[in-house]
Image: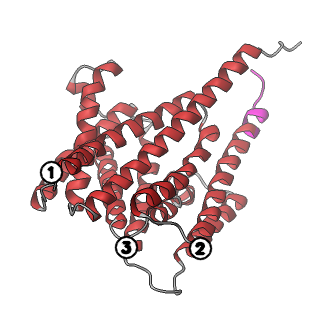
Amino acid sequence: MKDAPDSSNDTDAARQRLKAIGLMVAAVVLFSGLDTTAKYLVTRDGLTVGQVVWARFIGQFVLLLLFVPAFGIMSAKALFTTNRLGLQLVRSVLMVGTTAFNFLALQYMRLDQTITIVFLAPLMVALLAGPLLGEWVGRRRLVAILVGFIGVLIAVRPGFGVIHPAVLYAFAAMLVYALFMLLTRHMAHFDPPLVTLFYSMFVGTFAGAPIAYAGWQTPPDAIAWVLLGALGILGGVGHWLFLHAYRLAPASSIAPFIYMQLLTMVAFGYAVFGDLPDLWTLAGATLIVGSGVYLVHRERSIAREMVDAAPPS
């Protein structure tokens, strides 16, 4: 005879899921604020991409060090201790690379255009997971990936009108980000998340310093200084909320809410720069988002089938 379902546990799980969704939505708002601030500093205040990238990493690095004691880690040795030093360094370089390519693209493209291309990254992860991690996709998921690529073609429209070369920066950011996510998944088996996050900020701070110094442009006013300092806060708090959301609820429950960033990007783009997406971008983004949500749904269905097929304990 089966035990009666515990309604209190179901209620707690539902509350946790709602809290996780709220944290995810807050995270994507902060990520959109990060990109908007970076674009403003580069296009309106005349700062270089190198110094904006570096400010983003050093700000988050300082924030991380300030709050490290809250995670129960008091020694620098614990943060530097890794089982895969080479992979940690490669992953950190990838994070710096995707940030730099994204900010380069934002110099010339609208916020909604860049995020539409970046949304292709989860589909690219699913495609590359086969040859790199041995996680091959099935026929239906492969069709979803192809639909996502068609969405990008609709948004970019190669062969119809003039395409700004900065599109290549956006595609580079997307591809590097996909490799970054794959390596992050792989590193989860070897090192704690805080160690992995520490290496990303450490490498970004110290590797980016010479580049920032070489092209340094003094911010024109106090507001620009404040915005430069806010980059690390937006990125740091956003990533903390992002990670905390995944600790509270299954990925399949909250991953689709990542795509709300398209709405926040459109809102910020209009409020700050007066930009509005065209119909082609919206149509392409709809296909990409739909494909991404379908992949999340398929992962959830496959996981449920595996649980149902498992022998009773």
Examine the rendered structure and indicate whether residue 165 appears above or below residue 231: below
- Which residues make up the magenta segment? 305-313
Residue sticking out furthest to the right? 1
Q: Which mark is residue 209?
A: 1
**What residue is shown with label 2?**
280
> Is residue 204 visible in the rendered structure shown here?
no
Q: What type is the residue that disc 2 sits on? A: Trp
Mark 3 → mark 1, Cα distance in angstroms: 24 Å
User: Mark 3: which secondary structure?
Assistant: helix
**What residue is shown with label 3?**
166
Q: What type is the residue that disc 1 sits on? A: Ala
Examine the rendered structure and indicate whether residue 201 appears above or below residue 156: above
Q: Who comes first in sequence, dot 3 or dot 1?
A: 3
Q: Nearer the viewer, residue 176 or 233?
A: 233
Q: Position of residue 221 (x, y in %)?
A: 17, 52
Cβ–Cβ below 8 Å for labels 1 and 2? no
Figure quadrant of residue 79: top left
Q: Is residue 81 a member of the stretch shown in magenta?
A: no
Q: Is residue 178 left or right of residue 17?
A: left
Q: Nearer the viewer, residue 187 or 267?
A: 267
Figure quadrant of residue 69: top left
Q: Position of residue 241 (x, y in %)?
A: 45, 34
